[in-house]
Amino acid sequence: MRRRTTRLAAAAALTTISALALTACGSGFSEGSGAASDGALTSSDDSLTVLIGSSGDAETKAVTDAVASWSDDSGTGAEVSVASDLPQQLSQGFASGEPADVFYVSTDTLAGFAGNGSLLAYGDQLANEGDFFPTLVDSFTLDDRFYCAPKDFSTLGLIINTDMWAAAGLTDADVPTDWDSLKAVAAKLTTADHVGLAFSPEYARVGAFMAQAGGAVTTADGTEATLDSSENVEALTYVKDLLTSGDAAFSSDLGAGWGGEAFGTGKAAMTIEGNWITGALTNDYPDVSYQVAELPAGPGGQGTLQFTNCWGIAADSPNQQAAVDLVEQLTSTDQQLAFADAFGVMPSIQSAADTWKSDNPDQAAFLDSVEFAQGTPTQDGSAAVISDFNSQLSGLKDGDPKTILESAQKNFEAILQ
């Protein structure tokens, strides 16, 4: 029977709040250490519970098999469960004092769970700590503490329909490398049947243009909001111009749920998406021929967004040492390459990069983009701010970029207070 200290519920970190509330209050969390009082890891004979949010059967089987293999080798019992609502189930587990030992943690829930002491900060105890891509480590570092190992990641690239490309008289030499050439090829690709470029009306896509302009949501240390910067205004103005030209469109304006659907159904010749699109195209649109390119540079250089989760470990786990050992195995070179083969993710460690690119040459641009990738916000409350920002971005075509950014700036400043 486990005996754990009950901690404050992390649910407050994940509650969606209104834009009005955002402008009036901060996060409200006290800072927690997430470590044993003497710095040592707990150890016991207890089995481990692993809670994941799975993308489908392939991921569930791959993780279950990997954990079972580690369990057989180590002699420590371990069981994998798939959450139907991962943030909610994690919050309930932390509140009851009986959380899973190991679990997926997203960047936008990290601060809340870390802030109330629910997470063990174990990153600097990993034998493979130095193998993770630095930008991914940054995404899971708070107050100079590396909390958890990035399990894998994705970046955004430019996906091009090669049949439409050839029909427009374009060649490999025309693949856009900057904003001017992106605008030019989008115009050449646009016909009465499809637009040149389509992407989702959200920060998770438009934010790539902000990065290319040299902008960001916050300063590098995350302490100051910079949404209303001149760089971000320039980025949104460029996107607005693309939309009003008719050579680009939001996927929702084309009747598509996301950029991959607009691309796959032939409503757009290009889209901006992550490497998950390759599986969707194979399964749902197998007749579409395409290639992947790095996103073109803007005034601030090349830029893209990265998306990642980490392997969290509960501060209340009675067997933290075994949990860390399990995470080391799950993030090892061979295991990450096996995960990549099983369900299409990119490895979070540099030692697996060359093999992954050799195995997936048509997707190499996604992994090469890590060199200029920008992480999404991790501050407590940032998810609600970005959600409100997304609702405003959906009206960018007829809206004012500066006004939209000023509103988001005020909301983000509120959660940093």
Image (spheres, rainbow, N blue to C red):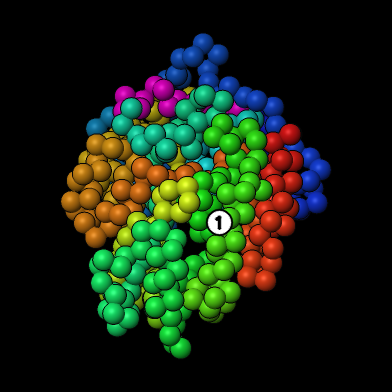
Residue 123 location (% of width, % of height): 43, 27
Can the viewer see residue 392 in this picture? yes
User: Which residue bears the numbered disc 1?
Assistant: 235
Query: What's the residue at 56%, 25% (across, down)?
Result: 143
In this view, the residue farthest toward the bottom is 192
Report whether 360 appears left or right of 384.
Answer: left
Residue 210 location (% of width, % of height): 53, 52
- Which one is nearer the viewer's eye here, 225 or 280? 225
Q: Which image quarter: residue 97?
A: top right
Q: Write the start and end of the magenta stretch as one range.
A: 117-129
Amino acid identity at mark 1: Ala
- Which one is nearer the viewer's eye here, 57 or 177? 177
Query: What's the residue at 19%, 46% (across, down)?
Result: 355
- Which one is nearer the viewer's eye here, 371 or 359? 371
Q: Which image quarter: residue 182?
A: bottom left
Can the viewer see residue 45 in this picture? no
In this view, the residue farthest toward the top is 38
Dominant secondary structure (helix, strand or loop) of the stretch shown in magenta: loop
For residue 217: magenta?
no
Query: What's the residue at 51%, 46% (across, down)?
Result: 214
Residue 288 location (% of width, % of height): 30, 77
Report whether 284 appears left or right of 395.
Answer: left
Query: What's the residue at 69%, 36% (across, down)?
Result: 416
Number of numbered callouts drawn? 1
Sort mark 1 into few (<14), some (14-19) or many (20+) by Cα contacts within 10 Å. many
Q: Which image quarter: residue 348?
A: top left
Residue 252 location (% of width, % of height): 56, 74
